[in-house]
Amino acid sequence: MTDPGTILFVTTSIFAIAGALMTISSRRPLRAAIGLLVHIISLAGMFLTLNAHLLAALQLLVYAGAVVVLFVFVIMLIGPASEVDAIQGSLASRTLSIAVTVAIVLAVSTSLAYFDEPWGAISDDFGTVEGLGMAIYSQALVPFEVISITLLVAIVGAIAIARSRTE
Amino acid sequence: MGIGTYLALASVLFGIGAAGFLTRRNMLIQLMSIELMLNSVNVVLLAFNRVNPENHDGQVFAFFVIAVAAAEAAVGLAILIAYYRIKKTIDTDDATLLKY
């Protein structure tokens, strides 16, 4: 029960849930961004318990290195207006929405926890840079090229949307 | 320890993200909640790939999910900045430009 993988999974899951709760509950967006950072780093650690080494590194590079920094930049750009007061709707509807979400989550998670069989054996290159790189560049080559064009279009689109129309 | 634990954790994280998206009016925090939900889907993909380790399909899928999430964050934040320029707020209750 107390093998290193279990300890890592329990630790990272506690931090992931705490970071997610901090993200959705804090009033200041900068604290929410830090909660998102904690969540993402914990999930990168959890990917290691699933033998996804390359994706753990990519999670740190892309999410912690790019997306969270982008959020922080936008928070600094917007300034004090980035804080919005709490929801003004009736307490009943708010409580109901949270209660429904919690009920669905509990129902799904308790039913899923019954399918708890131990993992099978894996090959040596599972999830490493070599194994996943071979999979991406052989069976997913066309989607890989398409995703590069998607990212280029997203960059150009983001610049076109966000620039000021002063001219 | 097995796939059920990971699926339960991923559903909890997805529920937290969904609750944040539904109950917050701050557009920035709603975008962060979308990232939470995308991350929980990645956990599911990697857990199922760990059950069937003879190929890398789940990990390839998670790779593309990460790439699309990065593009989504860039475009979403650009839309947020454009909206802030017009309205001087990022409260979604004030997003009434297409209402009438």
Image (cartoon, coloured by chain):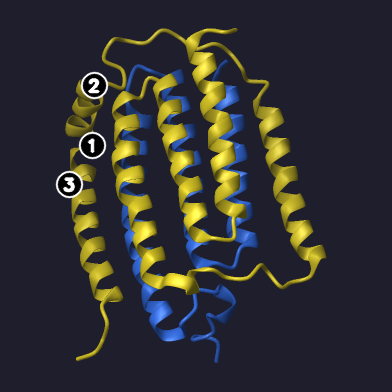
Chain colours: A yellow, B blue
Instruction: Determine which of the numbered discs, if any, sits on residue A145 in the image.
Output: 3
Residue pictured at 38% horizontal, 31% vertical: B58
Quadrant in the picture for the C terminus of chain A: bottom left
Q: Disc 1 is attached to a residue of which chain?
A: A
Give the residue type at disc 3: Glu
Depth-wise, is mark 1 or mark 2 nearer the camera? 2
Mark nearer the N terminus (3 vs 2): 2
- Does dot 1 land on a helix, a strand or a loop? loop
Instruction: Report in which chain the residue with disc 3 lies.
Output: A
Residue B5, x across and y down, in percent: 60, 24
Amino acid at circle 1: Ala
Q: Position of residue A49 (x, y in %)?
A: 44, 20
- Residue B45, given in percent of the width and then of the height, sits at 44, 33
Q: Which mark is residue A28?
A: none
Viewer-closest of A85 and B29 = A85
Alpha carbon of mark 1 to alpha carbon of mark 3: how far? 9 Å
Residue annotated with mark 2: A131
Residue position for label 1: A140
Looking at marks 1 and 2 on the same chain, the residue that comes earlier in the sequence is marked by: 2
What's the residue type where badge 2 is placed?
A: Gly
